[in-house]
Amino acid sequence: MRKEDQITIINSTINKARENLRPLSFNLIFWGVMINLMSAFHYFFKPVVEYSTYSYILYWIIIPILGMVYMIRWNIKKGIKRGYETVLDRTIKIIWAVFGLGWIIILISSLLIRKSPVPQILFLLGLVLVMNGLIIKFKPLTFGGIFLFIFVLINDTNPGINYLIVNMIGVTLGMLIPGLFLYRMKNSG
Amino acid sequence: MDKTLEKLLFNPIRLKIISFLISVEKANFKKLMEITDSSKGNVSTQIKKLENEGLIKINKTYFNNYPLTLCKITNKGKKAFQVFFDNLTSIKNNGLICLVFIVLNKYVTACFENTNLIFLSGQDCAKFNKFFTLFLGLMSDSIQFFYFLISSICN
């Protein structure tokens, strides 16, 4: 084998390891739709969700945890089907794992101090989205994260505001719309 | 460069495996089969050889009761590939430099053949130009020779 052939093999093989951001877009859309549906259900069927002191807490803990389990399994399956993991995939995976851990800590601490966890979760989500947007160089995602920061600020300055509405608008602007943009962009190549 | 490494990566399947693993964090066996366009047995033999040399790490696990083989390049593998690739590209660069020298040589020769730098009369001028051109050609060839001598010693 000639040296030129070896260089050609190396170049063509390295080019086969492409970044694939479609799973990330599906994750964003999934969580965007899920949080919106949960918030809408809570808003329109308040007596059902807030039936007892702990019912709404269970509602906001059990369903997202089930969603997390489903998405973790889905991501693992997709990863195996794809056959490889790049450094970028690993970075994004670690960032979202840290977000999951942060989400659990915020939930536990808010339960202990009896305060709504929505502003803290939105702030953490904003941070993660800005980081993701900057890493994958995708502006809608970065702006989505910035929108969430603005919503946290609005939340802090207006204590009487409905958290469910804030949640719905924030998640739509921060996750659902950037997720759809990312999905469309990756589909159109 | 290490002769064992050169011999190991001379095989196109092993070279493809190591080139793919250098650009990703980890890859499974099925993907390596797809990348190398080879059979299960062949890929299995090649990855074992690479693992024996410490260039890659093989991790065997299960997912949904199905066996899953994951391959990852080691630090030794990364360094070895870097050395191998640097060696390949330096040869390529040497080729380019050689081409530049040849072109320069021809250009200088052509220039001095057509130009009278020193205005001497008659036959002396023609003789001088001929020797001067020969001298320049010899100088240029000598530079090439010494460049390759030094670069081959350094590599």
Image (cartoon, helix red, strand yellow):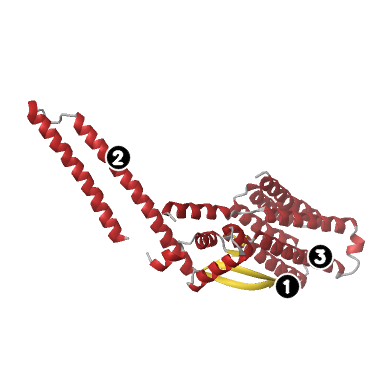
Q: Is residue A127 above or below residue A138?
A: below
**Camera-nearest residue between A7 and B63:** A7
Q: Quadrant of residue A59?
A: bottom right
Q: Earlier in the sequence, mark 1 or mark 2?
A: 1
| Residue A28 image label | none
**Camera-nearest residue between A99 and A151:** A99
Query: At 26% from the left edge and 36% from the top edge, which residue is drawn?
Result: B107
Marks 3 and 1 on same chain: no
Q: Amino acid at mark 2?
A: Val
Q: Is residue A34 visible?
A: yes
Q: Is residue A163 above or below residue A183?
A: below
- For this orientation, the residue located farthest to the top is B122
Marks 2 and 3 on same chain: no
For disc 3, the neighbor class at 10 Å (few under 14, some 14 to 19, many from 20) is: some
For disc 2, the neighbor class at 10 Å (few under 14, some 14 to 19, many from 20) is: few
Q: Amino acid at mark 3?
A: Ile
- Which residue in the protein does label 3 denote? A63
- Which residue in the protein does label 1 denote? B65
- Image coordinates of residue A30 in percent, x first then y, are 76, 56
Alpha carbon distance from label 1 to label 2: 64 Å
For disc 3, the chain is: A
Q: Quadrant of residue A117?
A: bottom right
- Which residue in the protein does label 2 denote? B103
Alpha carbon distance from label 2 to label 3: 73 Å
Query: At 54% from the left edge and 59% from the top edge, which residue is drawn?
Result: B20
Q: Secondary structure at mark 1?
A: loop
